Image (cartoon, helix red, strand yellow):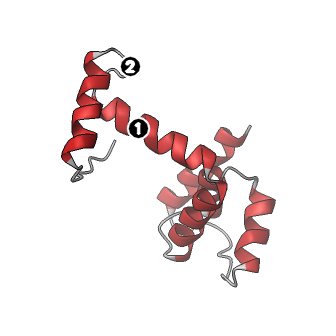
């Protein structure tokens, strides 16, 4: 799992540490993961925008974009077309092929 560094205001850091001490979260990383998941669960358009951006920059495949956006591959294809983004057909290498297989398994 990749690491990310963030600067968080003191009041939010205090609340996060208090929540960990209160047993609400296991640790700070758990708190941050929970908040991000909740945000993207509540903001479907943000999920889609993030997935579209990553796909457009060729950082992810169609299958992964669909998984991240919370839609099926056909819906993702239509979203990309609506955004004027050219579809890439087929994986560009073995890593992308494995990524497509994993994404397809996650959609089942």
Evaluate whether residue 43 shows in this view.
yes
Which residue shows up at 76% across the image and 53% down it? 72
Q: Which mark is residue 24?
A: 2
Q: Nearer the viewer, residue 66 or 14?
A: 14
**Side of 73 relative to 69 (left or right):** right
Whole-percent x, y for residue 37 in the image: 51, 41
Q: Residue furthest top?
A: 23
**Closer to the camera in the image, 26 or 107:** 26
Residue 39, percent from left and from top:
53, 46
Q: Could you tell me how far apart the alpha carbons at marks 2 and 1 are, in whole angstroms? A: 13 Å
* Residue 6 against residue 86 in the figure, above or below: above
Q: Quadrant of the C terminus?
A: top right
Q: Is residue 101 visible?
A: no
Q: Nearer the viewer, residue 69 or 42?
A: 42
Q: Secondary structure at mark 2?
A: loop
Do callouts 2 and 1 mark residues in contact (Cβ within 8 Å)? no
Q: Residue most toward the front?
A: 11
Q: Earlier in the sequence, mark 2 or mark 1?
A: 2
Image quadrant holding the N terminus, namely top left
Residue shown at the point (31%, 47%) measured from the top left: 2
Q: Nearest to the eye among marks 2 and 1: give it.
A: 2
Q: Is residue 83 left or right of residue 1?
A: right
Write down the residue under mark 1.
Answer: 33
């Amino acid at each position: 799992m990749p690491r990310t560094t963030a600067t968080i205001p003191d009041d939010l850091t205090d609340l996060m540490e208090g929540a960990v001490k209160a047993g609400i979260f296991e640790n700070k990383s758990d708190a941050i993961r929970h908040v991000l998941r909740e945000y993207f669960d509540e903001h479907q358009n943000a999920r889609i925008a993030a997935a579209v951006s990553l796909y457009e920059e060729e950082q992810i495949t169609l299958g992964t974009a669909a998984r991240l956006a919370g839609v099926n591959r056909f819906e993702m294809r239509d979203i990309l077309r609506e955004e004027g983004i050219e579809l890439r057909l087929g994986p560009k290498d073995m890593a992308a092929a494995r990524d497509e297989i994993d994404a397809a398994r996650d959609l089942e």
